[in-house]
Image (tube, rainbow, N blue to C red):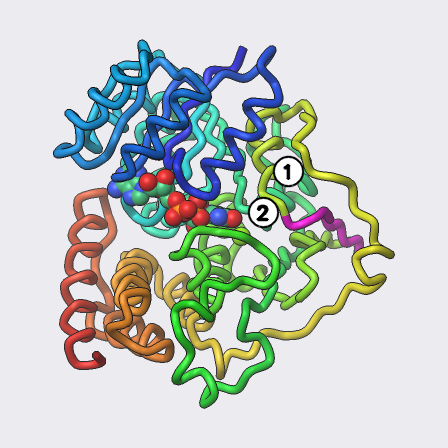
Amino acid sequence: MRRVAVLGATGSIGASALDVVSRHPDRLSATVLAAGRNVDALVELCMRHRPEHAVIADPRLHGALRDGLASAGLATQAHAGMAAIDALAAGDACDTVVAAIVGAAGLDSTLAAARAGKRIALANKESLVLAGALVMRAAREAGAEIVPVDSEHNAIFQCLPPRDGRAERETRGLRRLVLTASGGPFRGRSRASLADVTPAQAVAHPKWSMGPKISVDSATLMNKGLEVIEAHHLFGVPPSAIDVLVHPQSLVHSLVEFVDGSTLAQLGLPDMRTALAVGLGWPDRLESGVGGLDLVAQGGRLDFEAPDLDAFPCLRLAFDALRAGGAAPGVLNAANEVAVEAFLAGRIGFLDIAAVVAGTLDALAGLDAHDLEALRDADRRARADAGRRLERAG
Ligand code: NAD
Ligand code: MG
């Protein structure tokens, strides 16, 4: 029996993970559920999945969670605070962690799970963008198995052979990774026409149903930029061997090209439960609730085009940050989180997101990244710098 901690249980990925878990009561059990602030939603999930532990990140909500669990008649233990999430991710209550907290807030629990040698179904790409080298090293040293559940990286994971029978992938003979991107809701639009788009338009993704932050990232193509950095760390591939291709149908989830000219791809309906089933079941295949792919019913065609870096400069900024190295990817990520939050709150315009990130990257070039403390410091400084830029943009 796999004992699964779902961190970010009340989110979009959390829901998909719990759907897959509930299909396999004989082999999967949700033993830990963690969420940010939504106590009611967390208690409801506890009623359905009866975990041993529930954690709310906001410490002020400890009492509310305890009372909610008690009045539902549940034996689930209530915990609060980020440190409690990290401790449960590392502790005996689980052997598998679905890392689905949104943003840099997911780093500590991902790292705790890696250091404790857990199977990690990794959705939280920001932890790799911020501290990819540290997370991957910790996983290697502790024997943790990272199975990416970001759909593109999950596709690549499925296309590359295992190394020593483990989750780590073999990249000998690899020439190039090609990450596919849907293009988001604004594909085909000019830069000038994007000045007045609203948060509601930006989160209305044509193919995937996702949380608000990643939906905005998909609209700016920053999501693909973060994924390029994620792929670099997961598979140890240099930026020059990672390409991005816009594929509006979102059926080909990525491609892997080998030196002999072969290209392998993974296809499927755009439903995150497939990737989560791989993350939870690998090397076994699990029923996920996702139907097969009927290419004729899907319109009978697969289209591809190059990304428009003029309309969507965030993708270029992410490549720049990856090539610059050091703390630059973390600075990019932090500035982006601040800018996206301000955009969702209606404080800045859509084009200001890229402008804020570019400004912060310029201002904080060359910051050190030799250890976790240096990375955290760069993250803090980038948030402060981006915050000051918002005042000017808004
Ligand atoms: P979401 O906004 O729907 O859910 C986020 C979850 O994180 C919620 O449960 C929330 O309570 C929790 N959370 C927020 N702040 C927290 C904190 N400080 N401590 C603990 N928990 C906290 O987001 P999502 O779309 O599910 O995305 C989650 C992660 O998965 C992101 O990193 C995203 O990039 C990645 N991802 C999502 C998808 C998708 O299809 N939704 C696809 C690929 C990758
Ligand atoms: Mg993705």
Q: Are marks 1 and 2 in contact (CB under 8 Å)?
A: yes
Q: Residue at x 65, y 43 (%)?
A: 172
Stretch in magenta: 261-270
Residue 274 marker: 1
Q: Residue at x 47, y 87 (%)?
A: 193
Q: Quadrant of the N terminus?
A: top right
The percent position of residue 16, horizontal first and vertical second, equals: 53, 37
Sequence-first tag of 1 and 2: 2
Q: Residue at x 35, y 12 (%)?
A: 92
Q: Residue at x 23, y 44 (%)?
A: 371
- Front label number (1 vs 2): 1
Q: Nearer the viewer, residue 33 or 258?
A: 33
Q: Nearer the viewer, residue 229 or 221?
A: 221
The percent position of residue 110, horizontal first and vertical second, equals: 35, 34
Amino acid marked by disc 1: Thr
Instruction: Say which residue label 2 marks.
Output: 151
CB at disc 2 and ligand 2 closer than 8 Å: yes
Amino acid marked by disc 2: Ser
Q: Is residue 265 magenta?
A: yes
The percent position of residue 139, horizontal first and vertical second, equals: 41, 30
Check the image and report above or below for 191 versus 312: below
Q: Quadrant of the C terminus?
A: bottom left
The local crowd at label 2, few if under 14, some if 14 to 19, many if 20 or more residues have their Cα within 10 Å, is many
Circle 2 SS class: helix
The local crowd at label 1, few if under 14, some if 14 to 19, many if 20 or more residues have their Cα within 10 Å, is many
Q: Is residue 191 magenta?
A: no
Q: Quadrant of residue 285?
A: top right
The percent position of residue 133, horizontal first and vertical second, equals: 37, 44
Q: Is residue 326 visible?
A: no
